[in-house]
C-alpha cells in the first residue's frame, strides 16, 4: 500500500507538471504579452506574466522569493515522503501532492524562463533564442493565462467611493499550477485539518514511528 500511495502521488505531480508546462510553453510560443483568446464570453486565455516581486523591489526581492520557494518545495517534498512512509490516507497525500506540483510548476518558470525564452512584448517569444533569454537564472517571470470574467458591469453611481467604476468578477489571471495549489489547500482545510496538524507533528519531530 505504501508504494501504491507513493506512486499515485508521483503521478499527480508528474502529470500536473507536464500539463502546466506544456500549456505555458504553448502560450509563450504562440501569443504576445497581453494577447487574449476568447473561449467563451466568460472564459479567456489571456497571456500575462507575473514577476513575483514584492512591493516593487527588484532583483533582491525576486531572488529571495525564488530561493524561498525552492526551500519550501524541498520541505513539502520531505513532508510528502514521510506521509507516504507513515501510511497516511491517500486523499490527504494527494492534497499535499497537488500543493507540491503547483509550487514546482511555478518555480520552473522562475528558475528557467528568463534563460530559455526571449521577451514577449509585442512579439511571440522564441524558445532557446540565439541571442539569449530575457533574464538570468532564478529571475524568470511566471506565465499566467486563465481569465474568468464571470460578471462585468458598472457599479451604480450612488455607491460611495466606487460608484461609476467598472466591476469585474473574477478579475485575477492565473495558471494551472495556481489552481492545483488552491484546490489542494481548499481540500486540506475542508477535510484534513486535523490530519494536517497531526502529520506536521509526526513528520517533523526527531521521534521515529
Image: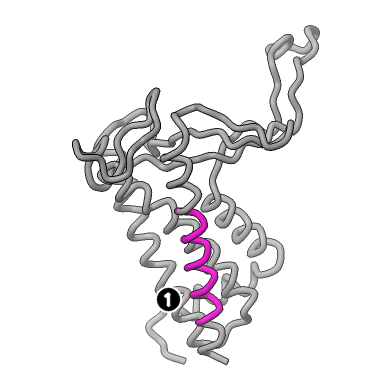
Q: Position of residue 172 (x, y in %)?
A: 59, 35
Say which of 194 and 190 sits in front: 190
Quarter of the N terminus within the rendering: bottom right
Q: Residues within 10 Å of mark 1 (few under 14, many from 20)?
A: few
Residue lying at 76% horizontally and 29% vertically, measured from the top left = 151
Q: Is residue 15 magenta?
A: yes
> What secondary structure do most residues of the magenta stretch adopt?
helix
Q: Is residue 26 magenta?
A: no
Colouring used for the render? one colour
Q: Quadrant of residue 187?
A: bottom right
* Rendered view: 168 above or below 174: above
Residue lying at 71% horizontally and 62% vertically, measured from the top left = 190
* Rendered view: 82 above or below 164: below
Highlighted range, magenta: 7-21
Q: Position of residue 160 (x, y in %)?
A: 74, 11
Q: Position of residue 5 (x, y in %)?
A: 56, 83
Residue identified by numbered label 1 = 204
Q: How many marks?
A: 1
Q: Is residue 16 left or right of residue 207?
A: right
Q: Is residue 40 left or right of residue 180?
A: right
Q: Position of residue 115 (x, y in %)?
A: 25, 44
Q: Secondary structure at mark 1?
A: loop
Say which of 5 and 199 sits in front: 5
Residue lying at 47% horizontally and 61% vertically, measured from the top left = 18
* Rendered view: 94 above or below 108: below
Q: Is residue 127 left or right of residue 183?
A: left
Most extreme residue toward the left, as rendered? 131
Amino acid at each position: 500500500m505504501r508504494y501504491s500511495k507513493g506512486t499515485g502521488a508521483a503521478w499527480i505531480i508528474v502529470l500536473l507538471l507536464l500539463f502546466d508546462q506544456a500549456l505555458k510553453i504553448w502560450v509563450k510560443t504562440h501569443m504576445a504579452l497581453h494577447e487574449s483568446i476568447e473561449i467563451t464570453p466568460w472564459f479567456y486565455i489571456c497571456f500575462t506574466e507575473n514577476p513575483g516581486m514584492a512591493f516593487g523591489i527588484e532583483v533582491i526581492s525576486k531572488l529571495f522569493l525564488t530561493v524561498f520557494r525552492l526551500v519550501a518545495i524541498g520541505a513539502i517534498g520531505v513532508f510528502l515522503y514521510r506521509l507516504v512512509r507513515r501510511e497516511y490516507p491517500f486523499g490527504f497525500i494527494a492534497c499535499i501532492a497537488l500543493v507540491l506540483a503547483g509550487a514546482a510548476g511555478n518555480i520552473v518558470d522562475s528558475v528557467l524562463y528568463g534563460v530559455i525564452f526571449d521577451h514577449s512584448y509585442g512579439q511571440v517569444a522564441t524558445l532557446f533564442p540565439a541571442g539569449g533569454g530575457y533574464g538570468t537564472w532564478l529571475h524568470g517571470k511566471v506565465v499566467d493565462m486563465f481569465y474568468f470574467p464571470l460578471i462585468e458591469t458598472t457599479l451604480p453611481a450612488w455607491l460611495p467611493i466606487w460608484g461609476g467604476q467598472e466591476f469585474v468578477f473574477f478579475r485575477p489571471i492565473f495558471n494551472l499550477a495556481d489552481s492545483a495549489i488552491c484546490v489542494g489547500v481548499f481540500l486540506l482545510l475542508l477535510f484534513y485539518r486535523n490530519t494536517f496538524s497531526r502529520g506536521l507533528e509526526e513528520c517533523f519531530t526527531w521521534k521515529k514511528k
